[in-house]
Amino acid sequence: MIEDLLARVQPFKVGLTTQFRSVNHRIGFVIRGKHGIGEWAPFADYAQAAAAKWLAAALEAADQPRQQLNRNEIAANGIVPALDPAAAVSWAADLLDKYQVNTLKIKVGDSDQLNRVRAIRSEFPNVTLRVDANGSYSETEAAELIREFAALEVAVIEQPCATLAQCKAVKGNGVLIAVDESIRLAANITEELLTEIRGAADIAVLKPIPLGGSEPTLNLAARLDLPVIVSGSLDTSIGLSYVAYVAALLPTEPLPSGLGTSVLLEQDLVMPSLLPMQGVIKVSEPILDEQLLSEATARVGSVELAELTQRLTAAANYLEEVPM
């Protein structure tokens, strides 16, 4: 498997316009296949099994024919990084003006979080707001902050606490609880875990690439019996196109999807980048820009390439032993 795989991959590295969750670039491989292009770019702290799930999704995108869609476009939210309040308002205004989104997801979990959300709510009183804490709060902190967010009419908070038990304890305080990391980072999705998720969450955030592709994503959506939001994983427009495709296999979503993240890319592999137009992402197969890919390949250093190749080899070996 690995010999065939290495023969059809090309490394890439693209920067971000602003640091996002301690990440300032995305690095990985583009995988060319019979039916399309896949993107393999697991974060550096992802272990072998998790990286293998990313590979399964990338291989599906490259090698499998696309299924019949239920939708041709997906409503998308705008993403606001953890900027100072004035910069966050300016960023939000740009999203609303350029892309006509009606929902903003604001990164929180830092010392300026309440000021950021207050400033955006004050400037845009009619926009739906979500916040994403990435599991950074203790149970006590979450309970206090959720009351503050509720007063600002925040609709949803994603993963306020690291554990499902903590999320369950702060549920029902005026802001809907969505869980992301508790699903995405789980080694196995057991019936026991599904029961815990249902008790802790009002909404499930499903990320098709870390979950291993369309089949596990659709199966999980059916088994959870919760409203589902499909989201990207800080992908280039290659990966985001695949995520939009998987989202379109679902009949509907209760809230806009997390597909607006290409606005964070300093460079991309597709021109133009996949971005919302009038609040929606059009589902389409990506067309790789060879010049952009060549430039992105040149940014990958020899040490980075060796490490990427080693990680890809380990993921491929794992995938052969434990098919997804």
Image (cartoon, rainbow, N blue to C red):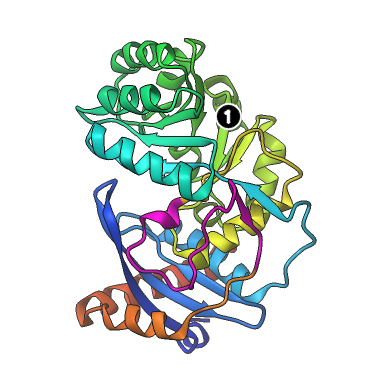
Does the rendering let one see residue 270? Answer: yes
Image x and y of residue 311, in percent: 35, 70
Q: Residue at x 25, y 32 (%)?
A: 85
Q: Nearer the viewer, residue 140 or 248?
A: 248
Q: Which residue type does callout 1 highlight?
A: Ile
User: Mark 1 highlights which residue?
Assistant: 203
Dividing the picture into quadrants, the one containing residue 193 is top right
- The answer to whether 15 is drawn above or below residue 120 in the figure is below
- Label 1: which secondary element: strand
Dividing the picture into quadrants, the one containing residue 105 is top left
Does the rendering let one see residue 55? Answer: no
Dividing the picture into quadrants, the one containing residue 264 is bottom left
Q: Residue at x 49, y 61 (%)?
A: 54
- The answer to whether 136 is drawn above or below residue 71 in the figure is above
Image x and y of residue 134, in percent: 36, 35
Task: Identify the magenta region.
Answer: 261-284
Image x and y of residue 106, in percent: 38, 35
Q: Nearer the viewer, residue 271 or 166?
A: 271
Residue 263 among those drawn in magenta: yes
